Image (cartoon, grey):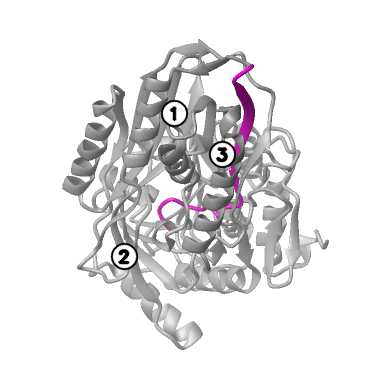
Amino acid sequence: MDKDLKKLQPAALWSHFAEICNIPRPSHHEEKIREYVINFAKTHHLDYTVDEGPNVIIRKPATPGMENRRTIVLQAHLDMVPQKNSDKEFDFEKDPIEAYIDGEWVTANGTTLGADNGIGASTILAVLESKELKHGPIEALFTATEETGMDGAFALKPGELKGDILLNLDSETEGELYVGCAGGLDLTATMKYDTEKIDKKEFAGYRLELKGLKGGHSGMEIILQRGNANKLLARFLRNYQEKLGIMLCDIDGGGLRNAIPREAFATVAVMKKNEKAFLNAVKKFEKLYIAEYKGIEDSLSFRAVPATLPAKAINFFDQANLVDAVYACPNGVVRMSTAMPGLVQTSSNLSRVVSERGSFKIQCLLRSSMNSEKEDLALTMRTVFELTGATVKTSGSYDGWNPNMDSPILKTMMVGYEKLYGTKPAVMAIHAGLECGIIGGKYPSMDMISFGPTIKYPHSPDEKVNIASVEKFWKFLCYTLETAPTK
């Protein structure tokens, strides 16, 4: 396992990324990475401020002869998604990411890599410390807690930035320029439940384990039709809970709102007289799921493992309401865009289902580039949950970013990319929440583009970044800075 990232090119960028991998930085625990960036500014004698985000803003003057260029804001977020394989012992608040070179890629050992958005942050630091690169005035914006709500972008105040152009370095396919993104909305449903004693003479304990799904980014990869562990577990229970006398004792499925659920677990009590039928049903549904997701989820596993029988189970009426709500809740692609073929317009991700302290908690993330569709989908989901007695709350709503095809920086970058690589870049909109949408709302006259290197499977332990694409991305950024529009 080759862990020497610093030998890769461009050396300055990879050197910073290697150092960032050693700094714990899951969302809401970004103190150390923020300190690293502040110390960098101090070491290089660069002006910096920390706002209420807390975001870090670093300013670097233009190089000689470039003073007439428009000020460019280079932007990336400091936090990362903390996801790991269930058999991996790892503490994201303490342990360094075990990054290594795997052929043409850099990946991590059993955890998310944090290339999203560590590569973007490392790129900005490399620009700021460069003495060879030609560029106009630069503002570097390192935002806080993007992955769990874009807190830093929401906290940014008008007037903090002086730049004319924003280059967001948080996209994940090299050769694509993003000029628009989806808005989002969080929906949380809660349902109270009662418990009842289990007759140990009549029931046996089992743990249902649905694992091996790919998961991934709930915006970028929702179009891939990957399995949702919460939905698949609910489907099994909806078919057999009453027929086989399955009583739910606890449930824990999915993780973060913006990650497609890879795993779901439930402790259940099964009537002993139905044990054989129960085990056969699990095997039947595993085969069914494998057949339905052939070529998509080739590592899918559904098992029933003997477990200690709890003293109590969830009241069957409350259990049935939960299963009905999760089973019926819209999930995945809801509508495709007619304006941009191949782009998801509206979707939902049923990301989290958990029982805790007498309540079920269900979390969903809705996305749409059409605000009216986003609100309509939220109402549909609210209706489903309220029919089963749940209390529903929505929060964190943000608008999308509307494309500007007459953008000066877009024209500059399209010409520059073709000159460098002999082909035109793809101009895209993305079905994900980029901070550009929020920042654009605060700075409506700011010209914006989002781009980046190729990152596969972000938000999952399979995350990896293509090495060659990082070098292309770096050269393209440097050329863009050198040819930026004048004031």
Nearest the viewer among 317 and 360 is: 317
Name above or below for residue 55 compared with residue 340: above
Q: How many marks?
A: 3
Q: Is residue 168 left or right of residue 394?
A: right
Q: Tag 2's secondary structure?
A: loop
The residue shown at (43%, 84%) is 418
The residue shown at (18%, 42%) is 376
Q: Tag 3's secondary structure?
A: helix
Badge 3 amino acid: Phe
- Eye-nearest disc, 3 or 1: 3
Q: Residue lying farthest left?
A: 372
Sooner in the amino-acid sequence: mark 2 or mark 1: 1
The residue shown at (45%, 64%) is 451
Q: Is residue 223 visible?
A: yes
For disc 2, the marked residue is 343
Q: CA distance from mark 3 to mark 1?
A: 54 Å
Instruction: Pinpoint residue 313: horizontal percent, then vertical percent.
Output: 53, 18
Q: Is residue 49 left or right of residue 384?
A: right
The residue shown at (54%, 45%) is 281
Q: Which mark is residue 301?
A: none
Q: Is residue 266 visible?
A: no
In the rendered structure, which segment of residues is drawn in magenta?
201-220
Do callouts 2 and 1 mark residues in contact (Cβ within 8 Å)? no
For disc 1, the marked residue is 52
Q: Which mark is residue 278?
A: 3
Sooner in the amino-acid sequence: mark 3 or mark 1: 1
Sooner in the amino-acid sequence: mark 3 or mark 2: 3
